[in-house]
Amino acid sequence: MSATTVGRERALVVGVDFGTLSGRAIVVRAADGAELASAVHPFRHGVMDRHLTRTGQLLPPDWALQVPSDYVEVLRTAVPAALAAADADPADVVGIATDFTASTVLPTTAEGVPLCQLPEFAANPHAYAKLWKHHAAQPQADRINELAAARAAPWLSRYGGRTSSEWQFPKALQVLEDAPELYRAMDRWVEAADWIVWQLCGRYVRSVCAAGYKGLLQDGAHPDPEFLGQLHPDFADFVAAKLDQPLGRLGARAGALTPQAAAWTGLRPGIAVAVGNVDAHVTAAAAGAVGPGQLVATMGTSTCLVMSAERRVEVPGMCGIVDGGIVDGLWGYEAGQSGVGDIFSWFVDTCVPAGHVEQARQRGMSVHELLTEFAAAQPVGAHGLVALDWHSGNRSVLTDHTLSGLVVGATLATRPEDVYRALLEATAFGTRTIVDAFVDAGLPVTELVAAGGLTTNRFFMQMCADVTGLPIGVITSAQGPALGSAIHAAVAAGIHPDVPTAAGVMGRHEPRRYLPDPGAAPVYDALFAEYARLHDYFGRGGNAVMHRLRAIRRAALDAPGAGAAVPPSPQEARP
């Protein structure tokens, strides 16, 4: 159904956000961005980071896998549920768009069938989707970085001087080296953001966003075959044989919804399917913050920070600088923090005593809320702690996922809320480190706009304003990525001419919700100075103890019979 047939005033669009643990669909009025209803569907298999759910096979350290059929189940369940909740006539829906965590990538046949769905590969972990936080390809990333630096590869500076183990090339090289038979069998190495669009419209179109930030595509080219062949002889033709496909710009139409996908979703076949996008990048449109100097932080399991600028400059530790990577006509910058909500959840799940858990239960609140309340009652610096927020490695500005978390200053008087606050502060300090990198490179940050689940923690949001010294705006939508995808669907369907125009009409945020408290700045500055010293000491080569400990751990867990000796956690032992 076309926008002309429906009429612009009643035209609806659907956005679907594929996160780490679930997918969410939203129905939006294209004329003004009004959100009519949403629905969420948890991934049946979740994140497989200890064992394959289907077989029980133990996984090595630093793995994180998913089952692609879970993504299709989101289309089958969340989209129809959102339509029903909105009481929407499918005939009024003119377009659908999706976003995904990145780089989440999977091997498929030429027709797009995931290899994990083939019986001969169902027990091979490399046949599954490697989630963004699969960090087991760090050795491959290190070799790519070493070779690129030795050859002075011009594309390396676009990524702050280091590629990440989270991205397409290291993960593909890991498959080749660890499972060559599977590498030979795969016809396509597909970013999940592009795979789900392939399922919707029957056409494989690579998003310029994912290709640029996660696939080392710069100035129209990937690393050349000679470079790749030096990594491994059989990797020389990786781009031509496994990766290359037509590219689609953001907001463009990838194709039309197929009858099969229409049956899944309850939508009409033939409506516009937009080119895929990355969750954080699409959120900038939902916030109506796509202009230069507006740094959008999507804060959830991890944090991704994106900003557009009129010019390209080298900024240390960027996850990518891509022409048109957020909106056409501007350079899009990406940075990030690999662990944020994940770290807070780890602490609550593993380090909080039963008394705190029981107190939270009696008061009808979550343990997170209880610890936040206790932490907020402390004067700044009263806990005597400083932490490093590297429990899932460092994405920016060090780009090193073999780093690990650290808490300094603990005594016998240290309470759980003290450590919890120190972890919150470490996250804010990590954000300040990224902001400082932009400013030092000559790109002013005029506003920090927050999105994601952590925006509900007002204490944490105020802390971020106090630590960074920036006013913080907050996106008005609780479904930022899904709304951002819906905005791109409206552009693909022809309702709006381009993404900036659509973002101005359909996206919005409340500016300056949190203002820096000058009274808190001196102590936070002192704590940040200690954070910066630890950051450089452990992260820039002063002391490689974290790397050595990671190597010792890997060797111990890789020893014959070691996996069987590791008992499941209480969470994994639950039926």
Image: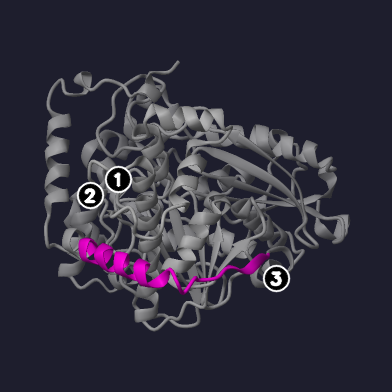
Front-lying residue, 88 or 260? 88
**Gap in Å between the C-alphas at discs 3 and 1?**
37 Å
Do tag 2 and tag 3 residues touch (Cβ < 8 Å)?
no
Examine the structure image and report whether residue 532 is included in the region drawn in magenta: yes
* Label annotation for residue 504: 3
> For the residue labelled by badge 2, is the local secondary structure a helix, a strand or a loop?
loop
**Between disc 2 and disc 1, whose residue precedes?**
1
**Between disc 2 and disc 3, whose residue precedes?**
2
Residue at mark 2 = 402
Task: Count neighbours of disc 2 (C-alpha within 10 A) and say few if under 14, some if 14 to 19, many if 20 or more.
Answer: many
Q: Residue at 27% across / 62% down in the picture? A: 531
Front-lying residue, 537 or 398? 537
Front-lying residue, 572 or 417? 417
**Between disc 3 and disc 1, whose residue precedes?**
1
Residue 524 picture quarter: bottom left
Q: In the rendered image of this protein, does residue 497 appear above or below residue 369?
A: below
Residue at mark 1 = 135
Residue 544, visible in the rendered structure: yes
Q: Position of residue 178 (x, y in %)?
A: 22, 37
Q: Position of residue 475 (x, y in %)?
A: 62, 61
Residue 381 picture quarter: bottom left
Type of amino acid under label 2 = Thr
Type of amino acid under label 3 = Gly
- Is 314 left or right of 82, judged from the image as shown? left
Type of amino acid under label 1 = His
**Gap in Å between the C-alphas at discs 2 and 3?**
41 Å
Q: Residue at 46% across / 41% down in the picture? A: 110
Do tag 2 and tag 1 residues touch (Cβ < 8 Å)?
yes
Q: Residue at 73% across / 59% down in the picture? A: 493
Q: In the rendered image of this protein, does residue 121 appear above or below residue 197?
A: above
Q: Which residues are magenta?
A: 508-535
